[in-house]
Amino acid sequence: MPVCVAFGCANRTKCKTESRSTASTSDASNSKISFHRIPGKEPQRSSWLQALRRANYNPASDADARVCSCHFTDSDFYFTNEGLRKIKRNAVPSVFPAFPKMKNLKKLAKIKDLPMDLQKGVCFL
């Protein structure tokens, strides 16, 4: 089942096969959420992976990996003549309310004695 791979996001689709831009979530109140595959071509792929800030993450090993529309701004979308909402080719996910603040990451690293790259704000869990 396709799921959003953004940190702290629990959005997922109802079924295994979903449209690239119109899949709904299992939560009826979020029925307007769409799911988007991580681009396969550079440089967009690198931009998305950097924005997701998941250390050592390889979406190629996860066929269900998607990023939901909650992680994009309204300006990242456009409407077709038919009224369909589509994501722009140059859009990069940028809305991540669940990311822990940097000072919280430092505390977590001290408590759990975890290796951490503070330059990039990535915690290796």
Image: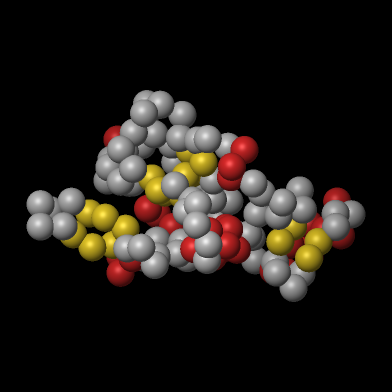
Q: Is residue 30 above or below residue 104?
A: above
How many numbered marks are there? 0
Residue farthest toward the front in the current orientation of the protein: 41
Q: Position of residue 105 (x, y in %)?
A: 74, 62
| Residue 124 visible within the image | yes
Residue farthest toward the top in the current orientation of the protein: 15
**Residue at screen point 46% across, 29% down:** 1
**Residue at screen point 76% across, 48% down:** 125
How did the renderer colour the structure? Answer: secondary structure
Q: Is residue 52 above or below residue 57?
A: below
Residue 101 quadrant: bottom right
Residue farthest toward the right in the current orientation of the protein: 113
Residue 123 quadrant: bottom right
| 7 relative position to 38: left or right | right
**Residue at screen point 36% across, 37% down:** 25
- Nearest the eye: 81 or 104: 81
- Nearest the eye: 94 or 65: 65
| 74 relative position to 95: left or right | left
Q: Position of residue 122 (x, y in %)?
A: 71, 61
- Nearest the eye: 78 or 41: 41
Residue farthest toward the bottom in the current orientation of the protein: 119
Residue 49 quadrant: bottom right
Q: Position of residue 48 (x, y in %)?
A: 52, 60
| Residue 48 visible within the image | no
| 4 relative position to 36: left or right | right
Q: Is residue 56 above or below residue 13?
A: below
Q: Position of residue 58 (x, y in %)?
A: 64, 46
| 24 relative position to 65: left or right | left
**Residue at screen point 36% across, 63% down:** 89
- Nearest the eye: 26 or 68: 68
